[in-house]
Amino acid sequence: MIVYKDYVTFSILGEEINLISDETDYGQITFAEIGGQYFYRGQVQPNVSAAISAWQDIFGREVTMQELHQVMIDNHLSSEAI
């Protein structure tokens, strides 16, 4: 049996966000899965920016600059030295 991981995962302030994206006849569509619930994100690329945007919409607040820096470190997109 072969199992494919067809999503990307980001850690946003302690929450695991899976972005599931597929190319359709109408363009690329993306869903965010958080805590077993799925949220339609529309035609966005499945990247850290989309994960942050989903987190902000779901939790109803903006990520601060300090939190953004930590998110980048947590997802290995920046080092702590910066």
Image (cartoon, rainbow, N blue to C red):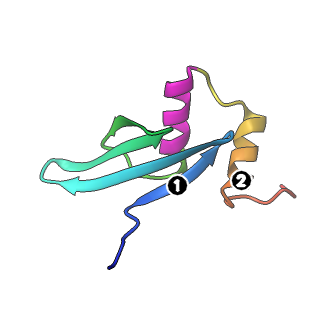
Quarter the C terminus occupies: bottom right
Tell me how far mark 1 sits from mark 2, CA to CA.
12 Å
Which mark is on residue 9?
1
Near mark 1 (Cα within 10 A), the count class, few <14, some 14-19 or many ≥20, is some
Check disc 1 and give the amino acid type: Thr
Horizontal side of 29 relative to 16 (left or right) equals left
Return the residue found at the far top.
60
Check disc 2 and give the amino acid type: Asp
Is residue 74 covered in magenta?
A: no
Near mark 2 (Cα within 10 A), the count class, few <14, some 14-19 or many ≥20, is some
Residue 13 placed where, x, y %?
A: 68, 39
**Residue in view at x 47 percent, y 58 percent:** 8
Foreground pick, 34 / 52 = 34
35 versus 27 height, above or below: above
Is residue 58 covered in magenta?
A: yes
Residue 25 placed where, x, y %?
A: 12, 53
**Residue in view at x 23 percent, y 56 percent:** 23
**Residue in view at x 69 percent, y 46 percent:** 71
Q: Which residues are magenta?
A: 50-60
Q: Marks 1 and 2: CB-CB under 8 Å? A: no
Q: Picture quarter containing residue 44?
A: top left
Q: Picture quarter containing residue 77?
A: bottom right
SS of the residue at dot 2? helix
Horizontal side of 15 relative to 5 (left or right) equals right
Foreground pick, 12 / 37 = 37
SS of the residue at dot 1? strand
Q: Please tell me which of labels 1 and 2 falls first in the chain.
A: 1
Quarter the N terminus occupies: bottom left
Q: Which residue is mark 2?
A: 74
